[in-house]
Each structure stands twice: as structure tokens, then as C-alpha cells.
């Protein structure tokens, strides 16, 4: 494509803005629910979910940041806050003196185990229930295709 931008058509702009609006409202609503009911931020929840799914409940700091699409500084600040609250810990990485692992603690496991059922109920209520099974399948296919494109184009 040349230097000049090819503007979105009205249909493309509507689709794009609808996705953004949906994402912002879902994220806001789900984050507020987590905060009120579990004293977790959406970021806390994202870190804990990824750690519970990781072998041994731990991930390299850099891999966790990459998975969440966060800058290293954001990840560092987030982990520092979570360490202070006892939700995660840091472990040295013997293979790489500069790297470190982020490890979920027993308290982190307890908190995520309590928060997850409520969070899933809200995801179901706000996102799953309004869609038919066919719409949900189509939505997942479309989202997977976009994610695939994003993974191919990483800098």
C-alpha cells in the first residue's frame, strides 16, 4: 500500500467500531465485577489465569509479557504489585541469569479459584448467552483468523 491511507468503507468502519465498542464494554464490565467481588483487577486475573495454565504454575517473565501483549515495564509493575499482595512470587532462572520466572503462590491459586466461577458466569451472561451456537462458532472462527494474522506479522 502506498503512503496514502485507504479509508474504511462505512461497512468496514461500522464493523471495526462495533468490535472496539464490544471489547471496551466487556472488558470494563468484567473488570469492575472482578474488582468488586474478588478484589482483583482485570490484569491480576489475566496473569493468574496464564500462570494456572502453565506447567508448574510458572512462566518466564518475558513469555508472560509476550502472551499478554504487554510491555516489559507494564509487566514488571504488575508483578511487583502482585508480589506485595502475595499472589505471585519471583524465581531466578538458572539458564538465564537476567531472566526470572513468575510463579503463582498458594494464595494466588486460592484467589483465582474463588474468582473464576463468578467471572465465568459473567462471561456467559454478557457474551455467550446473547449469541446462538452458530453465531458463537462464526465469531470464534473470525477471531482465530485475526489472531493468526497477528501472530504472522509480529515485529
Image: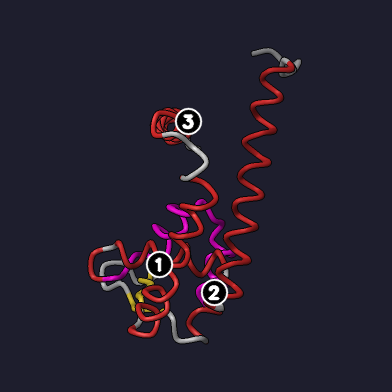
C-alpha distance separating marks 1 and 3: 28 Å
Q: Nearer the viewer, mark 2 or mark 3?
A: 2
Left or right: where 26 falls relative to 106:
right
In the depicted structure, whether residue 91 falls above or below residue 63 = below
Q: Nearer the viewer, mark 1 or mark 2?
A: 1
Q: Nearer the viewer, residue 6 or 120?
A: 120
Of callouts 1 and 3, the N-terminal one: 1
Q: Is residue 113 magenta?
A: no
Q: CB atoms at circles 2 and 3 under 8 Å apart?
A: no
Q: Residue at coordinates 45% horizontally, 66% vertically from top-left? A: 47
Q: Nearer the viewer, mark 1 or mark 3?
A: 1
Look at the image and tell me in which quarter the N terminus lies: top right
Q: Residue at coordinates 52% horizontally, 77% vertically from top-left? A: 38
**Residue 90 percent location from the top left of the image:** 39, 79
Rendered image: mark on residue 40: 2
Residue for badge 1: 117
Residue for badge 3: 146
Write down the region rendered in magenta.
57-80
Q: Nearer the viewer, residue 155 or 96?
A: 155
Main SS type for the magenta part?
helix
Q: Residue at coordinates 59% horizontally, 73% vertically from top-left? A: 35
How many numbered callouts?
Answer: 3
Amino acid at each position: 500500500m502506498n503512503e496514502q491511507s485507504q479509508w474504511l468503507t462505512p461497512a468496514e468502519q461500522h464493523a471495526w467500531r462495533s468490535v472496539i465498542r464490544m471489547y471496551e464494554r466487556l472488558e470494563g464490565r468484567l473488570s469492575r465485577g472482578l474488582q468488586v467481588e474478588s478484589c482483583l483487577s482485570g490484569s491480576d486475573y489475566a496473569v493468574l489465569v496464564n500462570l494456572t495454565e502453565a506447567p508448574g504454575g510458572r512462566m518466564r517473565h518475558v513469555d508472560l509479557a509476550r502472551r499478554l501483549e504487554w510491555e516489559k515495564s507494564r509487566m514488571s509493575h504488575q508483578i511487583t504489585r502482585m508480589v506485595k499482595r502475595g499472589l505471585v512470587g519471583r524465581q531466578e532462572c538458572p539458564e538465564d541469569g537476567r531472566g526470572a520466572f513468575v510463579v503463582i503462590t498458594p494464595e494466588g491459586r486460592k484467589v483465582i479459584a474463588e474468582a473464576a466461577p463468578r467471572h465465568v458466569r459473567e462471561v456467559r451472561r454478557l457474551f455467550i448467552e446473547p449469541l446462538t451456537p452458530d453465531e458463537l462458532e462464526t465469531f470464534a472462527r473470525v477471531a482465530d483468523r485475526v489472531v493468526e494474522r497477528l501472530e504472522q506479522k509480529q515485529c
